[in-house]
Image (cartoon, grey):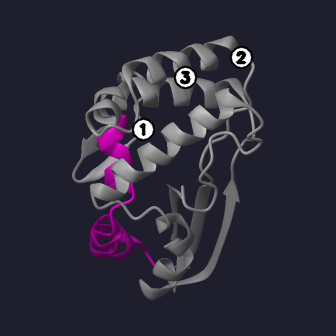
Amino acid sequence: MTRSDGYLLDNQQNEAGERFDAFATLFDPTTFRHLEGSMVKALRPGGRLLIEDADPALQPLVCPDEHGPEQELANRLRHGFRHLLADRGADLAYGRRLPRLLREAGLRQVEADAYFPLTSPACAALESATIRQIRDRLVSAKIATNEDVDRHLANIASGAMDLATAPMISAWGRKA
């Protein structure tokens, strides 16, 4: 993720190094106020705006089918990650608010949907990159030990767990 004029832009060439900060920024309610002040106003009449954001509170588990110690560890680390985000001021239910926020910004014909995979190689790659990125924060907050993190990363690499992501909420509307 890279920053450009206060917006977060997807840049697949970038390393995973900024993901945690990007997550925290995406869940920041002031982000939309910035969008409202510029992106919505920049729309021509009839123009459409699409905003996407995750909603970790809607589906908080990385392993919805928690049936063993590997899944329990994964969910404990995910809970810790959510705790770290919340401590930084992130709104973990922000995604579900997008339709209302678009209407409040003056958009009409607002619609929204949600998507999240229950298992996919992309989920494993994202979980692995995220855990590597926040490892030191998890350990320093005493949410996990280095051994816990190593064990979780090995469990991910084994391919034996069904890993999910937080739902991605897509909301769109049209300027009157």
Vertical placement of residue 174 versus 26, above or below: below
Contact flag, marks 2 and 1 (Cβ < 8 Å): no
Label 2: element kind? loop
Residue 52 visible in this rendered orientation of the protein: yes
- Indicate the quadrant where residue 155 lies: top right
Contact flag, marks 1 and 3 (Cβ < 8 Å): no
Q: Earlier in the sequence, mark 1 or mark 3?
A: 1
Residue displayed at 59% across by 41% down: 75
Q: Nearer the viewer, residue 161 or 117?
A: 161
Q: Which residues are magenta?
A: 19-46
Give the alpha-carbon distance from disc 2 to disc 1, as whole Å. 26 Å
Q: Earlier in the sequence, mark 2 or mark 1?
A: 1
Other-residue count near label 1 (Cα within 10 Å), few / some / many at <14 / 14–19 / ≥20: few
- Indicate the quadrant where residue 119 lies: top right
Q: Nearer the viewer, residue 108 or 113?
A: 113
Other-residue count near label 2 (Cα within 10 Å), few / some / many at <14 / 14–19 / ≥20: few
Vertical placement of residue 100 versus 68, above or below: below
- Quickly name the residue at label 3: 152
Main SS, magenta region, reads helix
- Indicate the quadrant where residue 40 lies: bottom left
Which dot marks residue 159? 2
Indicate the amino acid at tag 3: His
Other-residue count near label 3 (Cα within 10 Å), few / some / many at <14 / 14–19 / ≥20: many
Give the alpha-carbon distance from disc 2 to disc 3, as whole Å. 11 Å
